[in-house]
Amino acid sequence: MAWYDNGEKGMVGQIANLTFRRVESFPAGGSIKAGSLVKLDSTKSKVLKLNDDADKGAILGVALQENKEVYADGYTYHEGDTVSVLTKGDVYMAVSGSAKYGQVFTVADGTETLTLTAVDAGTEGAVEGLMAVENASDLVAVRVK
C-alpha cells in the first residue's frame, strides 16, 4: 500500500513543497533509510546516515524518498546506490511530538534514524540548519538550510 492510499499529506523523506531546493547525489556508504540525516564519510566520497548526536555538526542534508519504489514504510538506499540528498529546501521528516513554525530540533539516538524533537530557537544542543516550516505533529515539513 502506498502513502497516498492512507490520506496522508506525504511521507518521511518526501519533498514537502515547491520552495527553492538543491538536491545533490552521492553514493551510499551503507544502508540509509529515506528521511535520514546524512553526512559525508571521511573521504568525502560517500554519504552515511548520522548515527548519533555527536555527528550533528556534520549534517550534509536529508536522504530523499525515491519515487521509483514508494512503500508505506519508506525507502532504503543500499551500499553503492545513488542517494538523492536534499541540501537545501523543505522535506517531510518524522518528529517526536509536535512542532511549531520556526522551531528548531535536537536529535537523539533512535533505532532506524535519529529522533528529532522540536525546541525553541536558541536552545542549547539544537541542530543548526533544520527548522520547522509548519505547525504539525509526527510528520513535519522541515527546512534544510
Image (tube, rainbow, N blue to C red):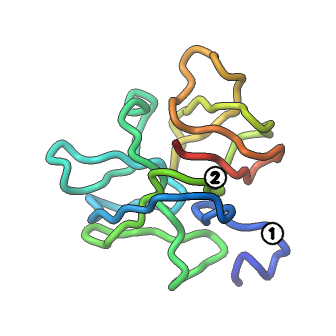
Residue drawn where x is 52% and y is 42% of the image: 145
Q: Residue reaching furthest left?
A: 43
Determine whether, in the image, residue 44 is placed left or right of residue 38: left
| Amino acid type of the residue tagged 2 in the rendering | Met
Q: Nearer the viewer, residue 21 or 70?
A: 21
Determine whether, in the image, residue 123 is placed left or right of residue 83: right
Residue drawn where x is 36% and y is 35% of the image: 58
Question: Where 68 falls versus 139 (above or below)?
Answer: below
CB atoms of marks 2 and 1 within 8 Å = no
Quadrant showing the N terminus:
bottom right
Determine whether, in the image, residue 28 is placed left or right of residue 85: left
Q: Secondary structure at mark 2?
A: strand
Give the percent coordinates (x, y) of residue 123. 63, 16
Give the percent coordinates (x, y) of residue 119. 70, 26
Q: Residue beneath label 2, please?
A: 93
Q: Nearer the viewer, residue 102 or 111?
A: 102
Give the percent coordinates (x, y) of residue 8. 81, 69
Q: Secondary structure at mark 1?
A: loop
Q: Nearer the viewer, residue 23 or 4?
A: 23
Residue drawn where x is 51% and y is 85% of the image: 68
| Amino acid type of the residue tagged 1 in the rendering | Glu
Give the percent coordinates (x, y) of residue 128. 51, 30
Residue drawn where x is 61% and y is 66% of the image: 14
Q: Residue beneath label 1, please?
A: 8
Label 1 crowding class (10 Å Cα cut-off): few <14, some 14-19, many 20+? few
